[in-house]
Image (cartoon, rainbow, N blue to C red):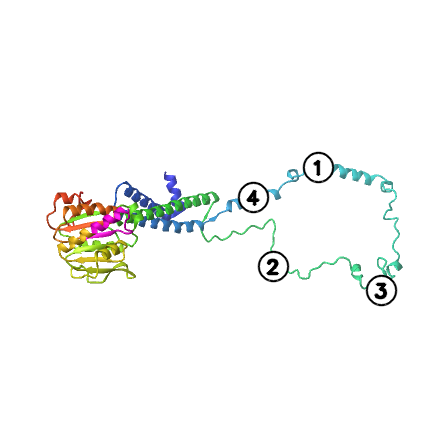
Amino acid sequence: MTAALGKLAFYFGAVGIVSIVAWVVAALLMAAFVCGVRRSAVCWLALAAAILGLGLAEFNSNRVSAIEIDFSEQLRAARQRAAEETEMTPGESDVSDEAEKARQAEVTEKEELAERPGAAETETPKGKETSESKEPAKPEDADDGSIDGESSGDESRYSYRQRGPVERTEGMKVAEKIPIGPGTEDQPVAKTGRTLKPREWAQANTFDRVNLFFARWTCWLAIFLVAVDYFRRFNLTFKSLLPVPLGGRLVDSLFPKTHTVLLHGPSEGMVRKYLQRAVRKGETFIYFGPEDPWAIPSLERLLFVWSLKKITCTPEDEDFDDEFLFESAWFGRYCFVAAGDGHWALAKVAGLADFLELRRATRASAPHTVNVVWELESAIPPDTLTRLANLCRETNFKLLVATAGPFSEESAACFEERWSGAHAPEKA
């Protein structure tokens, strides 16, 4: 174990060790989240550690890639072998004993023939003349002006043959002559970076590849875990984080939401924030309250580039009927504020129950969740509340009742989620 740590410290240095520690910490935080520590801070800390580990691993990988291989030992051994080969004795040469004996026998035979009198004349092959029997060329034959049977008129054409072999040096210029001999040694190459022996270089690159592999996969897993935690909180009633308009049936099927919520006690602005987050998630709402909580004509959906128009209805306003209100909310065209007394609002809620009953008969559901919020002092009748609560889940509506007055246990049993004002949720 100590040797392995020593190798890591030698190959990677401080940067590589920190990168390993960072992605290991990220892996431990992700394991803690999976095992039950459902905290968004754990996911974001794991992501930060994974990004730090990947960045340091990439930086350290560039340093490892810049390491050069040190071939000094191989070059030294090669020079030693070359020196040994040049200093070999004749007995140590590569010529075999049989070849050496044959050469010596041939030399001896030639010496005996040379000592024997008249050996040169007797050994001359028949039909061939010796050099002494050849007659010298006549001077007049060389001056007759003909070469190889050609006339004297072509003397200038073939006169270059009479000059013999000529060494051609034109165009062959050597700027500097480098002496190469037995005493010449290779000059050492200047090393500008870190060098390692071939085996150590291979081990360093292996460790680097393993470190990059785990650092990259840890970063991707941390990103995936952050996305899972984000969408897990996306459909929570009051704890969604930085909502964006991504809500829809796919997200609802992967991360189910509650469809009936009771907020009993002082809300302290929770309803207003809840509706604003719902619009940012791509949803819409129908709000029943004593007055309009917003004095603006539209609510922001995505920064300042996309907004949802708000329509305020009152008992004195007859421009919008129930069909227009419910159909527009169903398709997410507008969000509505029904500001009036309890009697008028109860009639609207009863009409909404009839509208959802028809939609359930055809097995239809809204493309995006429609939030129905009741924040009036008068309570919804138990039969209407039970009917509406049963229809919300099947038609992708969500009912939130916020009241500070007394609430019966029969009515409270209709809700999947119960909150006591701004405190922790009660068990349903």
- Residue at (38, 49) in percent of width and height: 57
The residue singled out by tag 4 in the image is 80
Tag 1's secondary structure?
Answer: helix
Q: CA distance from mark 1 to mark 4?
A: 29 Å
Residue named by callout 1: 99
Foreground: disc 1 or disc 4: 1
- How far across and down, in percent of the image, does residue 42 sit? 27, 47
Range shown magenta: 352-373
The reply to whether residue 249 is in sight is: yes
Q: Quadrant of the N terminus?
A: top left
Indicate the amino acid at tag 2. Answer: Glu
Q: What whole-number distance in Å separates the C-alpha atoms at marks 2 and 3?
A: 47 Å
Q: Nearer the viewer, mark 1 or mark 3?
A: 3
* For the residues bearing labels 4 and 2, Cβ distance under 8 angstroms: no
Residue that numbered label 3 is attached to: 153
Which residue is found at the position 40% from the left and 45% from the top?
213
Please provide percent x and percent y for residue 2: 36, 39
Give percent across and percent down for residue 31. 30, 42
Name the amino acid type tagged 1.
Ala
Q: Is residue 178 left or right of residue 406?
A: right
- Does the CB distance between marks 1 and 2 fall below 8 Å? no
Which residue is more in the foreground, 239 or 37?
A: 239
> Dot 4, crowdedness within 10 Å: few (<14), some or many (≥20)?
few
